[in-house]
Structure formats: structure tokens, C-alpha cells
Amino acid sequence: MKIISVSGTPGTGKTFLSKRLAKKLNFYYMELGKLISKNKLYYGYDKKRKTKIITIKNLNKFIIKEIKLFGMNKKVNGIIIDSHLSHYLPKKYVDFCIITKCDIKELNKRLKNKGFNKNKIQENLQAEIFDICLNESRQRKHNVIVVYTTKGFNINGLAKKLGG
């Protein structure tokens, strides 16, 4: 069973890519944001940044448990894990780590359309400029594939690269 994490700055196209890729490869789609809320994997709320506060250690424990449960299900070919936090999973649990990237002007437009406040937009634009998710995934020694989503992407080529 293959595990593919899809990470990147919010607004760069992780969810769009993840859902299409999961459908193309017939993989289970795991959206961490919903699982964090549903399973109360947070310990507080940052009002200023309008986001839940989580610990990576606890999140990883939960994801690893889920991966092991899915591993017992022979009908599942693999899992796509969609979240800007998915690259924090230990390398041994991830076959490929896809990092989505986007042009800054386009990202700014996307974040405004999502209703992000000015400070959160600036924070995310800076994260994209400084390649935070990409650098962190490389530091964790993941097998990284960068996908630029500004003008779309080739889902068939990506699926082939992933062995599907």
C-alpha cells in the first residue's frame, strides 16, 4: 500500500490535486483538517490566526494508527493524505511527498477568495516565498515531488510518476 502526503502552503491547490489523484489512482482520500476537528486532535484555538492549535506528535500518532488500520484493508491500494501538515509524518510512513506550489499573485487572489484576513494572507504568502513546506519536507528526507498548480497540472503524468 502506498502512502502519498500532499502538502504545501494553504491555497496552493493541495485539495484539488489530492482529490483528483486519489480518484485517478483509486486511493483513499484522507483530509486531515476534517479529522483534526472530528477527533478533537487540537488543544486550543488561536483567535488571532483563526486556527486550531495542534501538536505534531499527537497528530502523527493518530495518522500512523489510521494508516495501520487501512493497511489491514486489502481493498485499499493506497492513501492520499491532504494537509499542509502532512509532510511532518516520519519518512518511513510516506512513499512520496507532493508539495504544491503556486505563483504569489495567484496565491494572493486564491487566499482572498477563501476569505483569509490580511495578516493570514501575508503569513501564507511569506511561507510560500520561503518554501517552508518544501524545505521542511526535504529536511525530513521525504521523496519529494513538486507540482506547480498556477496554470493546472498533468494528473496523468503525475499518476505515472507515482507508479499508477
Image (cartoon, rainbow, N blue to C red):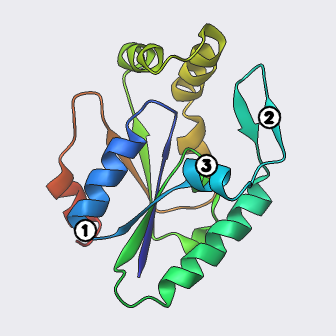
Q: Which kind of residue does numbered mark 1 sit on? A: Leu
In the structure shown, which secondary structural element does the residue marked by tag 2 occupy?
strand
Between 141 and 65, the one lying in front of the other is 65
Frontmost of labels 2 and 1 is: 2
* Residue 94 pos. (x, y %): 52, 69
Specify the farthest residue to the right.
Answer: 43
Residue found at x 77% / y 47%: 54
Q: Could you say which is closer to the camera, residue 143 or residue 65? A: 65
Relative to 163, 54 lies left or right: right
Q: Is residue 49 left or right of residue 25?
A: right
Question: What whole-number distance in Å separates the C-alpha atoms at marks 2 and 3?
Answer: 17 Å
Identify the residue at horizontal 72%, vertical 23% (top origin).
49
- First reached walking from the N terminus: tag 2 or tag 3: 2
Q: Residue at x 50, y 16 (%)?
A: 115
Relative to 29, say whether 130 is above or below: above
Judge the density around disc 1: few (<14), some (14-19), many (≥20) Cα neighbours within 10 Å. some
Q: Position of residue 53 (x, y in %)?
A: 78, 41
Q: Mark 1 sits on what residue?
A: 25
Camera-near label (2 vs 3) is 2
Is residue 70 among what the camera can see?
yes
Q: Amino acid at mark 3?
A: Leu
Indicate the secondary structure of the residue bearing disc 3: loop
Up-down: is 149 above or below 140? above
> Could you tell me the amino acid type at mark 2?
Tyr
Q: Residues within 10 Å of mark 2 (few under 14, many from 20)?
A: few
Label 1: state its secondary structure. Answer: helix
> Residue beneath label 3, please?
85
Among numbered discs 1 and 3, the one appearing first in the sequence: 1
Look at mark 2 in the image and give the residue it sits on: 45
**Total of numbered circles in the picture?**
3
